[in-house]
Image (tube, grey):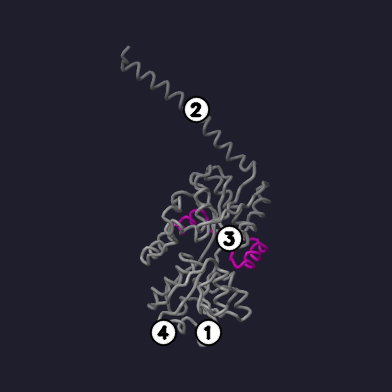
């Protein structure tokens, strides 16, 4: 039987009424889920091996978060491809607040360095809270470069070499590599990158004299700086760091506006309820205000630094764009 306009309108009205009647139930269910969150274990994914600064910070914060939420927070390490393997999995996890990831700068930038990273850092996650800054430092072998005591000395020395002076980092596309490339671009000099597979072998060979210069994570380099085996000549952050109060920033040494800070923060899958995100962010803010947490992070070479979801989102966007442009300009790849 053909549908009359009246029949169609009546059916539309009934469907609308049913949908409107169901809406409060659906919304009520969602609100109820958020109101009872968390009622089970939370997974905190670390995209790097156990023992590094990202892992250490995750365990410090995870333990405190578990105490506050009164639910277990289980840290799971899923390393590989600058953290992109873990990030791709987390991006596809349910957006229910029970899966979090500690983002670190290499994972933030991995989609620029791997053709098939499997995720978009900006679009596939919900920012929750920045947790720490991880200072990086330019170090030299004091036996090989005895007269290089500051950045000006390094630049002058590099410019008069017949062949490019070698420097190393923890790997192609690592934050140390990108930061040194930015420094060379802004300061107008050139060195040759010698990538290693990890920070430990790179530091070992810098101490051993195989490579005279390194841009290193402070957490890895600090014991060797304190022992006199390496000399710190500049830090990449806009401000000096408490662990090396006498070492000037790169900006202080004439490269105005230079800012290179590796950092970490919590992400959740895109679509995670706002109430859950704000709850976690509020807890993280209080956790990072605790003196013992600040001291533990500092001992691991990281500086406690809280940013809200909105602030972290802006930082992700800015770093993704800024460093992505440098990666493209320099043709840097991890493949």
Q: How far apart, in angstroms, are the residues tagged by discs 1 and 2?
A: 75 Å
Q: Is residue 192 visible?
A: yes
What's the mark number on residue 54? 3
Is 49 magenta? The answer is: no
**What residue is drawn where x is 62% and y is 46%?**
42
Q: Position of residue 273 (x, y in %)?
A: 52, 43
Q: Position of residue 138 (x, y in %)?
A: 51, 75
What secondary structure is found at the residue carrying circle 1? loop
Foreground mark, 2 or 3?
3
Query: What residue is disc 1 on?
Result: 144
Name the residue nearer the viewer: 199 or 72: 199
Lower position in the chain sequence, tag 1 or tag 2:
2
- In the image: residue 74, left or right of residue 239: right
Query: What residue is disc 4 on?
Result: 161
> Circles 2 and 4: CB distance less than 8 Å?
no
Lower position in the chain sequence, tag 2 or tag 3:
2
**What residue is drawn where x is 66% and y is 50%?**
66
Foreground mark, 1 or 2?
1
Q: How far apart, in angstroms, are the residues tagged by discs 1 and 3?
A: 32 Å
Q: In the image, which residues are magenta?
A: 288-316
Lower position in the chain sequence, tag 4 or tag 1:
1
What's the mark number on residue 22? 2
Q: How far apart, in angstroms, are the residues tagged by discs 2 and 4?
A: 75 Å
Name the residue nearer the viewer: 206 or 95: 206
Tell me if residue 328 comes above or below residue 269 in the rendering: below
């Amino acid at each position: 039987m053909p549908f009359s306009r009246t029949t169609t309108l009546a059916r539309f009205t009934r469907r609308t009424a049913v949908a409107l009647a169901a809406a409060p139930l659906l919304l009520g269910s969602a609100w109820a889920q958020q109101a009872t969150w968390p009622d089970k274990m939370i997974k905190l994914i670390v995209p790097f091996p156990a023992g590094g600064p990202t892992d250490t910070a995750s365990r410090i914060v995870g333990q405190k978060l578990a105490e506050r939420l009164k639910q277990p927070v289980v840290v799971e390490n899923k390393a590989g491809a600058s953290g992109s393997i873990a990030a791709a999995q987390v991006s596809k996890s349910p957006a229910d607040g029970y899966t979090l990831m500690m983002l670190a700068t290499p994972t933030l930038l991995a989609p620029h360095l791997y053709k098939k990273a499997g995720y978009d850092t900006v679009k596939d996650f919900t920012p929750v809270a920045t947790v720490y800054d991880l200072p990086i430092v330019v170090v030299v072998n004091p036996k090989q470069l005895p007269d290089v005591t500051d950045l000006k000395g390094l630049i002058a020395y590099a410019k008069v070499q017949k062949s490019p002076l070698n420097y190393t980092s923890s790997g192609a596309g690592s934050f140390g590599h990108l930061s040194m490339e930015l420094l060379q671009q802004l300061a107008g000099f050139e060195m040759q990158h010698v990538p290693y597979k990890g920070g430990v072998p790179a530091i070992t060979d810098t101490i051993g004299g195989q490579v005279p210069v390194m841009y290193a994570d402070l957490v890895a380099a600090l014991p060797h700086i304190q022992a006199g085996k390496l000399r710190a000549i500049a830090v990449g952050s806009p401000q000096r760091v408490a662990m090396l109060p006498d070492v000037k920033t790169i900006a202080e040494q004439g490269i105005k506006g230079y800012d290179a800070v590796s950092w970490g923060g919590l992400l959740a899958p895109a679509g995670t309820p706002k109430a859950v995100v704000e709850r976690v962010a509020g807890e993280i803010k209080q956790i990072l205000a605790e003196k013992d947490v600040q001291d533990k992070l500092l001992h691991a070479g990281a500086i406690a630094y809280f940013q809200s979801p909105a602030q972290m989102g802006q930082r992700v966007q800015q770093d993704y764009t800024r460093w992505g442009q440098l990666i493209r300009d320099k043709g840097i790849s991890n493949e």
